[in-house]
Image: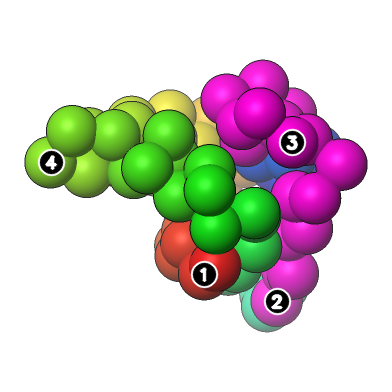
Amino acid sequence: MLYKLCLFLVQSLVDDPAAVRIDRIETEKVDIFFIHANPDDRGRLLGKKGRTIGAIRTFLEGVAVPLDREVVVELLT
């Protein structure tokens, strides 16, 4: 569920949603997402002073709390 939500959020923000790829490492309590996108979309995902990627992290962490999970999101381009 968290993976699909992360993919939806990221694809909604970029100009080239087909180029988005998210690698996931799932452990017992932690989901780690590595976001790969077109380098031209890096600025869109980061936002001013990292606010957009920060908002994505905060949102996913909020969704993960009732599921008793933790989320780590890293942007790789």
| Residue 67 % position (x, y) | 62, 41
Q: Is residue 68 above or below residue 10?
A: below
* First in sequence: mark 3 vs mark 1: 3
Q: What kind of colouring is applied to the model shown?
A: rainbow
Q: Residue furthest left?
A: 49
Nearest the viewer among 64 and 5 is 5
On screen, residue 74 versus residue 9, left or right, reads: left
Indicate which disc, 1 or 4, sits on the residue closer to the N terminus: 4
The residue identified by callout 1 is 76
Q: Earlier in the sequence, mark 3 or mark 4?
A: 3
Q: Residue under circle 3?
A: 16
Is mark 2 in CB contact (under 8 Å) with mark 3? no
Q: Is residue 67 visible?
A: yes
- What residue lies at 75% left-to-right and 50% top-to-bottom? 20
The residue that mark 4 highlights is 49
**Helix, strand, or loop for circle 1?**
strand
Q: Please report the residue visible at 73 percent of the width from the left and 69 percent of the height from the top.
A: 24
Question: What type is the residue that disc 4 sits on?
Answer: Lys
